Image: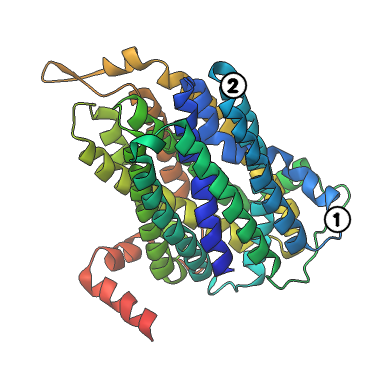
Amino acid sequence: MYRQELYNGVAYSLLGDTLVYLLAISFGAGNIALGYISSASYIAGIVLPFVPQMFQGRNHIKVQSLVWVLRGMVCLLYLGFFVISGDFAVLLLLVVYTLFNIFRMVGIALNDSTLKNISSVSNRGKVVANVNAAYQSSSIVVRVLTALFLGIQRFSGLVGLVALQMVGVVVNLLASREMSLIPSRSTIVYKKGRTVMVLLKEAMGSVTFRRRLILRWISTAVAVIFGLTTPFLRIELGLSNSVVVLYSVTLGVSVMAASYISKQFSDRLGSRPLVFFSTLFSLFFFMAWVLVTKSVSPVWFFILGFFTNFFVSLISLLTYRLVAQVMPDEETVAFNSMVNFVIAIIAFGVGILSGFLADKADFARSLFTLDGRATGNGYTLVFLFAIVLTSIETLVASRLQELGAYSSQAAAQVIFSMHGLRAVSMIEKL
């Protein structure tokens, strides 16, 4: 599975959000469209409730490899950019990217089942972190190469962006082939009457399920908002395509760092205290995004992006683990479909609202003053929205119960002391 994730990291880096943002901006897409792109990878979850019915009784690895092929082949339609432009090009991009994410989301829902089958409760945090590290390592390498490629004047525009998409299609086929080689006798199960609303009602009726799901959903919403920092650099700061891709490299490194921390601490300390502390740090860094002005050196945006994404990604990994702990074994696909269905609705609303807030740039820039001078930027309202959601995360995390997890005070003594860190490191080596 690790080799498949290596290919997948390359494929998604070429077919996914960063290059899609750059294509959209090159055709003059507005903030609402960019907000939709930021949420599109989650919006596709709206189709997941139909997955168990469509593929009932079929081997989930075979279905997963099939949808992975389809997600790449649909991107061949990007070749149409050579014959259309303007609003029609933006529309084509949004349609293709939506289809891409529909197939991708189906695969991800099945991938949760794969991870559950190849790991145990005791090592699931480590397995998830290792899989994520394999994905991110290949992603970082290809993004560096992409930045160098786009740095060449001849390939800095449409030709270069579409050519990279076509390379992504080829690598995606390799990822699909590797996926098909994963041994599994697990089949997709559908229980009549077990609809999204039934599963949602049952889950929300349990305090354990409810708080974990709320954390998962809000963490996704915050990730959607943070995704808009990529077009922010292109639109607000006017940075080149190659520099924006380098920013995505910085974000990839931060995700790898988050995966490492998750692997080191989540299985030993529990996810709850780590989520709680991560939300506090996220609040601080989002406030920095609220107040920073475009006159600041781009280097600081890279640093700010690294630390913010580190905590946003860490929260996402930990909330995924929290939900996986209570996921019913006999209804894994159906349960994931329900979770991602709600995520789709939330992500769509958050993406569109964030785009709407980004359109209020003139008001946002004059919202705060420091020493008589306006501070902030065109996306200040967007980042304030992230602060509101992160504050809710903090409150929910503080009330969450997790069996075997450290208390916040005990976890702090480990995390914020050299003695505690050395102790965890030594345990890991045993």
**Residue in the foreground of this view, choosing between 202 and 358:** 358
Q: Residue placed at 42% from the left, 17% from the top?
A: 359
Residue at the image point whose x is 37% and y is 23% from the top: 381
Q: Nearer the viewer, residue 123 or 407?
A: 123
Name the residue that disc number 2 marks: 84
**Separation of disc 1 and disc 2 at Cα?**
40 Å
Instruction: Determine the secondary structure under disc 2.
Output: loop
Q: Which image quarter holds the N terminus?
A: bottom right
Q: How many marks?
A: 2
Asked whether the viewer can see residue 221, the reply is no
State which quarter of the image contains the C terminus: bottom left
| Contact (Cβ within 8 Å) of mark 1 with mark 2 | no
Of residue 2 and residue 47, the one placed in the foreground of this image is: 2
Q: Amino acid at mark 1?
A: Gln
Please tell me how crowded label 1 is: few (under 14), some (14-19), or many (20+) other residues with Cα within 10 Å.
some
* Kind of residue at disc 2: Ile
User: Residue 67 at what x, y percent from top left?
Assistant: 71, 51
Point out residue 317 in the picture as x, y percentages from the top left corner: 48, 56
Q: Position of residue 374 (x, y in %)?
A: 19, 17
Which quadrant would residue 375 be assigned to in this image?
top left
Q: Residue drawn 41% across and 21% down?
A: 358
Secondary structure at badge 1 equals loop
- Return the mark for residue 56: 1
In the rendered image, the vertical position of residue 318 relative to residue 162, given as above or below: below
Q: Nearer the viewer, mark 1 or mark 2?
A: 2
Labels 1 and 2: the sequence-earlier one: 1
Mark 2, Cα crowd under 10 Å, few <14 / some 14-19 / many 20+, is few
Report the residue at 27% width, 72% height from top. Answer: 420
